Image (cartoon, rainbow, N blue to C red):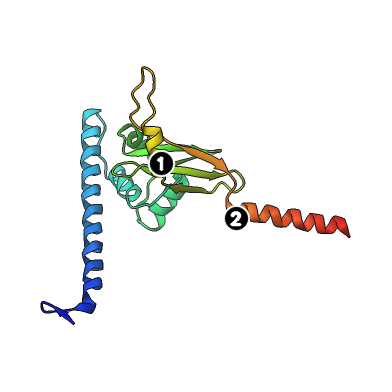
């Protein structure tokens, strides 16, 4: 069967291609926008616009999810082939946090970061055993939190961290407990 001059079996392929190209354009638009925001922030606050700072920004906005300074350092040295010192990374991340382009999280004992521009509201589950951080979205929670009236306070944004035990660690703990109980019975 044909629609116009295109065979019907090509429609899903064409739609995926259009979606892929659209997502690349969205990513390019976001990177251009954050570059402009950062440029204006640096200028307004009397900071130099260095290639290293923009390379760090570019790398951060190519990462999906959370990262720490060590993983960013490794990624820039290995994948991006752009060498920067750890001091430059730390100083630039502080600037990016102040410019509201990066969010700093304190998960258990480690500091992790994530890009903040054009990201949807999400929550975090942190395993207290292995430290794994999983993001999730829950519209009911979001509506409840955003609908909460606070006396003499106007919230601009929020973060929600839920600490517990992930399913992998839970299974491991149960297996260890079962093995210990089996040994005691013998």
In front here: 180 or 24?
180
Q: Residue furthest right?
A: 186
Q: Which residue is mark 1?
A: 140
Query: Would residue 182 appear left or right of 46 to someone viewing this image?
Result: right
Looking at the rendered image, the quarter that the C terminus falls into is bottom right
- Look at the numbered disc 1 and give the secondary structure of its residue: helix
Q: Is residue 36 above or below residue 59?
A: above
Residue 90 visible in this rendered orientation of the protein: no
> For the point 34% across and 50% down, which residue is it?
59
Q: Which residue is mark 2?
A: 168
Query: Would residue 161 appear left or right of 49 to someone viewing this image?
Result: right
Q: Residues within 10 Å of mark 1 (few under 14, many from 20)?
A: few
Instruction: Please state which of the two labelled residues, at mark 2 or mark 1, is closer to the viewer.
Output: 1
Q: Residue furthest left?
A: 4
Q: Residues within 10 Å of mark 2 (few under 14, many from 20)?
A: few
Q: Position of residue 133 (x, y in %)?
A: 50, 47
> For the point 53% across and 44% down, which residue is it?
126
In front here: 82 or 103?
103
Mark on residue 40? none
Residue 62 visible in this rendered orientation of the protein: yes
Q: Position of residue 20 (x, y in %)?
A: 25, 63
In front here: 81 or 110?
110
Query: Would residue 106 appear left or right of 172 to someone viewing this image?
Result: left
Q: Position of residue 23 (x, y in %)?
A: 25, 57
Q: Position of residue 38 (x, y in %)?
A: 25, 38
Q: Quadrant of residue 80?
A: bottom left
Looking at the rendered image, the quarter that the N terminus falls into is bottom left
**Total number of numbered labels?**
2
Q: Quadrant of residue 97?
A: top left
Cα–Cα gap, marks 2 and 1: 26 Å
């Amino acid at each position: 069967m044909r629609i116009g001059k295109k065979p019907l079996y090509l429609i899903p392929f064409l739609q995926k291609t259009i979606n892929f190209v659209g997502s690349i354009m969205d990513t390019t638009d976001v990177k251009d926008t954050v570059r402009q925001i950062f440029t204006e922030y640096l200028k307004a606050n009397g900071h130099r616009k260095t290639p290293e700072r923009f390379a760090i920004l570019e790398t951060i906005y190519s990462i999906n999810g959370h990262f720490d300074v060590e993983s960013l350092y490794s990624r820039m040295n290995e994948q991006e082939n752009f060498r920067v010192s750890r001091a430059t990374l730390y100083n630039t991340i502080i600037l990016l946090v102040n410019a509201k382009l990066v969010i700093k999280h304190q998960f258990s004992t480690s500091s992790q970061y994530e890009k903040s521009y054009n990201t949807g509201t999400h929550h975090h589950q942190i395993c207290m055993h292995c430290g794994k951080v999983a993001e999730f979205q829950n519209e009911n929670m979001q509506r409840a939190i955003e609908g909460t009236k606070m006396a003499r306070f106007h919230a601009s944004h929020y973060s929600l961290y839920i600490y517990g035990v992930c399913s992998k660690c839970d299974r491991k703990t149960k297996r260890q407990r079962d093995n210990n109980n089996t040994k005691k019975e013998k």
